[in-house]
Every structure is written in C-alpha cells, then in structure tokens.
Amino acid sequence: MQFLLGVLCLSGALTLSPSLPWKRHASLMHGEMSQNHTHPSIAGYPNRCDDLGFDAITPDEQGVTHFFRDEFLWSGFHSPADLINKTWPHLPDHLDAALRMHHKNSPDHHDRMFFFKGNQVWQYRGNIPEGQFLIHDKFPGIPDNLGAAVECPKGDCAEDSVIFFKGDTVYQLDLSTNAVKEKTWPELHHCTASYRWLEKYYCFQGTNFTRFNPITGHVPDGYPKDARNYFMRCEGREHAHKNKSVDVSIYNRCSNRSFDEFNEDELGRMYAFRDGWYFRIDSNRDGWHPWRTNSSWPSLHGKIDAVFSWNSKMYFIQGPNLFIYKTEARYSLIQGYPKPVAEELGIPGTSVKATFICPQSSLLYVIMGNHLQSVNLEQTPKVLGNGFRIAHFHVDGAMCTTKGVYLFVGTKFYKYDSPDQLAAWESSPEPQSISKHFMSCPH
Ligand SMILES: *[C@@H]1O[C@H](CO)[C@@H](O)[C@H](O)[C@H]1NC(C)=O
Ligand SMILES: *[C@@H]1O[C@H](CO)[C@@H](O)[C@H](O)[C@H]1NC(C)=O
Ligand SMILES: *[C@@H]1O[C@H](CO)[C@@H](O)[C@H](O)[C@H]1NC(C)=O
Ligand SMILES: *[C@@H]1O[C@H](CO)[C@@H](O)[C@H](O)[C@H]1NC(C)=O
Ligand SMILES: *[C@@H]1O[C@H](CO)[C@@H](O)[C@H](O)[C@H]1NC(C)=O
Ligand SMILES: *[C@@H]1O[C@H](CO)[C@@H](O)[C@H](O)[C@H]1NC(C)=O
C-alpha cells in the first residue's frame, strides 16, 4: 500500500515532493500494497495523525525513520507510538533535535545517533549509549537549545556535514574541518525537525513540511505541504493528485520491466534508470523511491540509451544527443549541451545500446547490437576501435565497477570479472536477477 500510494502521488502534479515513503523492509510486496490499514493507536498514547507535529525526526543506522514527540516515538512510517526510552535507554523526553551521522572518515562517529536537548547531546551506537556531552564540547560553534539537525553527507553537500537549525539561523558544520558557517535561509522558517530521506531534505514545522536544497536553502514551488498526506497514513487523508495513466511497472522497482541503464559515479552514487525515472541504489537501507531523472539531472527527460561517468562528469546518450553533467554535490548540465554524440565521442549515437567505463580508466566501451567497441576518451580525435562480439544479442544497459562488468538484459544481469573476460567469453555467465541483487526485491 505504501508504495502504491507513493506511486499514485508521484505520478501526479507533485513530482517534486516526496510521496509516502516506502517502508524499509524490501520484502513489501503486492499483497501488502493492497491493504489499507491506517495507523494503529494505543489508548493513552498519542496518535501521530493529530496536528501536533514532531520534536525531531531521523533515520537510524538501519534506515528506519523515527518520529519523536514528548516522551514518545513512532518507528517507521506506520507503527503505533512507544516510549523513547524503550529503544534508547536513558534518553530524555522532549528532544530538541536528532540525527544519524554519516562520516566514514571518523569511525567513532560514523553511523552514530545523536540526540540533542538543552545544552546536552547524547551519542548512541545502535541502541547502546556511548556518552553524554555538552553540545559546545562535542560540536564547537553550535548553540544550545536547537530547533533541528540533519546530516548532509558528501555527495549531497560538498563534504560530510551536519546542518543545525535554531530560530532563523542555519549552522553548517563541515565535519572534516569542524568549520561552522552561519547562514539565514529566508525560504525556511523555524524548523522544529529536519530530516533527510534518500537524497531529499525536509524541514518540518508542526505537521507542515518543506523540501529544501541543503546547499542553498532554496525551496521548490508548492511547499509547505502537510506531512500527514505523505509521511504517514492517516484516516480521511489521501494524495490529492493522481495520474493513473502512467504505467505502474515503471516505478515499481520489483516489476519485471527492464531497466534502460545502470551507473555508478565517482562519489559512489549508484543509479538504475528506467523510462525517465531513476532509483538510487546505494542508499537502499533508507528505502526506495522512484524520482524523475530531471529532478537530479536538469533537462534530462525520458528514456536514455547509455550513461557513464568519467573525469568527474556524468555522460548520458539519448538518441543522437550527448548530455554532460558536472558531478558535484548536485549535477549541473554543462553549458552548450546536449550536443551530437557522433561529433563529441566519434560514435554513431543512435545505435548505442549501452556504455561502460571501468574505474581509473579512460577507455569507454560501447555496445551496439552484439558488438563491443572501445574509444579512448583521452585521445583527440576520438576514434572507435575495432571491437569484438559478445555473447548477448541484445543488451539494455551496462556498468563497470571495482567488482567487474555487469551487462543488463531484460530482468537479468550477467557479471564478468573484466572487459578481457567479456572479450574472451566461451559461454556466458549464469544470468542473475536484477530485482533481487540490485533492487532488494524477493525475486
Ligand atoms: C479498506 O478499509 C475499509 C474500511 O476499514 C474496508 O471496508 C475495506 O475492506 C478495506 N479494503 C481493503 C482492500 O483492505
Ligand atoms: C521511560 O520514560 C517514561 C516516560 O518519560 C518514564 O516514566 C520511565 O520512568 C522511563 N523509564 C526508564 C527506565 O527510564
Ligand atoms: C502550514 O501551512 C499552511 C499553508 O499551507 C499554513 O496556513 C499553516 O499556518 C501552516 N502551519 C504551520 C504550523 O506552520
Ligand atoms: C498523466 O501522465 C501521462 C503520461 O505521462 C501524461 O501524458 C498526462 O499529461 C498526465 N496527466 C496529468 C493530469 O498529469
Ligand atoms: C511481467 O509480469 C506480468 C504480471 O506479473 C505478466 O503478465 C507479464 O507477462 C510479465 N512479462 C514478462 C516479459 O515476463
Ligand atoms: C521534470 O519534468 C516534469 C515533466 O516531465 C516537470 O513537471 C517537472 O517540473 C520537472 N522538474 C524539474 C525539477 O525540472
């Protein structure tokens, strides 16, 4: 149900908004989707569908989102309330802010939970307390009595960071240098809770929420919205905008529809593309959501033929056109693009089925029909070399990571250790399920 609602919502006018997030467990299947239970509630415990909002919201290190209010918390998108201290012993009630920290360079802080109240901060690893500190000792430059806090990992922000909110002031803490930048973001007001879900950032005020860009504070049109229509299932509330004419198999990531392409960029962000939509694969512990390609890659709409990352840029081939995006915290289309693929890469764009390039290499492999040819991106002019035949008559997409070369065909993928192994094939490897191995589906 969660997913279906999400789909219905997304396909309407609300393409920039989050739809109802899908619950964490990848095993949610069609049977469950068709149920329509509302939030269970327990006598004496509050109901999250009332209009009181939340003190803090954060995912934990397993990707489960927790909503805090007073001495209660709701874990996940549809559980009843429970006491906070049943999950995090010794944690006080009435929190100011909470966050999961992403900071791989500091193993003692990476994937830890931090809870803020007054001038104190509590650190937990899973549910195990690791200490209680003064905020100004643990986070120098950050004030007491915060309104909200949210992690902003490298890839979303320029470096692993935390964004704190207090009143109308925003404090951006760069975890690698401990530098704090103070800002005011006039489009956001007094966040009482802030939350990152997948790649998107939200500021809550009561039950209203606003999506924002974590670098500029910019808010897209159409906000605030009421969280009860998106982040929880509340009786008598439903997404207002539906567009049932879009084929659900496109954004049901477990459907047997093929994907157009896969790619991993140099910051480790891995994506699956399908008919103008994409899924982010590497963030899957926090859940799944289909987003329109143009929400991350401006001006890119519809089905793509091929994609690869090279030299801090992401390249998309769509028919005769080549789009090049700078790969920074956000993707930006390089001025003057799209340009003709044939001129830029020396390959006939319209017959390209898939491309891949291995890490630390400048050799781009291009799949056309059952032929694989390569072009060295460092050479000018670019010339497509002689190629070889591969074991597959039709390939939808291809990707090379440190683990090997993946060819995607229909609902299956074939993994080769290297381009050399692909060139020397005698029999193709066992097909494996894309939805099971990449999309966390049961099959
Ligand atoms: C949805 O809920 C209503 C009211 O509780 C119930 O009558 C109906 O059978 C439910 N539908 C499904 C598909 O569970
Ligand atoms: C947990 O919190 C409740 C409500 O604040 C409180 O009554 C109870 O004593 C707490 N339990 C423990 C073990 O701290
Ligand atoms: C929520 O947003 C609506 C407008 O969409 C506004 O009228 C209302 O005052 C807001 N509530 C809060 C608590 O900010
Ligand atoms: C619904 O989706 C179809 C296909 O994408 C589109 O042509 C149509 O304009 C959409 N309708 C609305 C009301 O958004
Ligand atoms: C995909 O699944 C649908 C429904 O489960 C089925 O009707 C259809 O034949 C399947 N298509 C392929 C190509 O397997
Ligand atoms: C993406 O494209 C859709 C239509 O395909 C449009 O409604 C939406 O505003 C676009 N989003 C962005 C961020 O440009």
Image (tube, grey):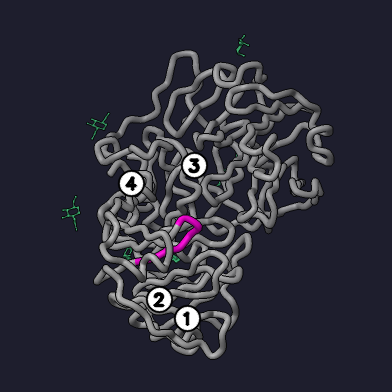
- In the image, which is nearer the foreground, mark 4 or mark 2? 2
x 60%, y 71%: residue: 311
Sequence order check, earlier mark of 3 and 2: 3
For residue 442, say whether it is visible: yes
Confirm or deny contact between disc 2 and disc 1 (CB under 8 A).
Answer: yes
Q: Which mark is residue 366?
A: 2
x 47%, y 75%: residue: 364
Residue type at tag 1: Val
Mark 4 vs mark 2, CA separation in Å: 26 Å
Mark 3 Cβ inside 8 Å of ligand 6: no
Q: Main secondary structure of the magenta part?
A: strand
Mark 4 Cβ inside 8 Å of ligand 5: no
Q: Which residue is disc 4 drawn over?
A: 436
Viewer-proximal residue, 249 or 396? 396
Across and down, in percent, residue 207 comes to: 55, 37
Is residue 189 shown left or right of residue 441? right
Residue type at tag 4: Lys
Sequence order check, earlier mark of 1 and 3: 3
Q: Which residue is disc 3 drawn over?
A: 286
- In the image, which is nearer the foreground, mark 3 or mark 2? 2
Which span of residues is magenta-colored? 397-403
Across and down, in percent, residue 431 comes to: 27, 55
Across and down, in percent, residue 172 comes to: 74, 48
Determine the image quadrant of residue 23. Answer: top left
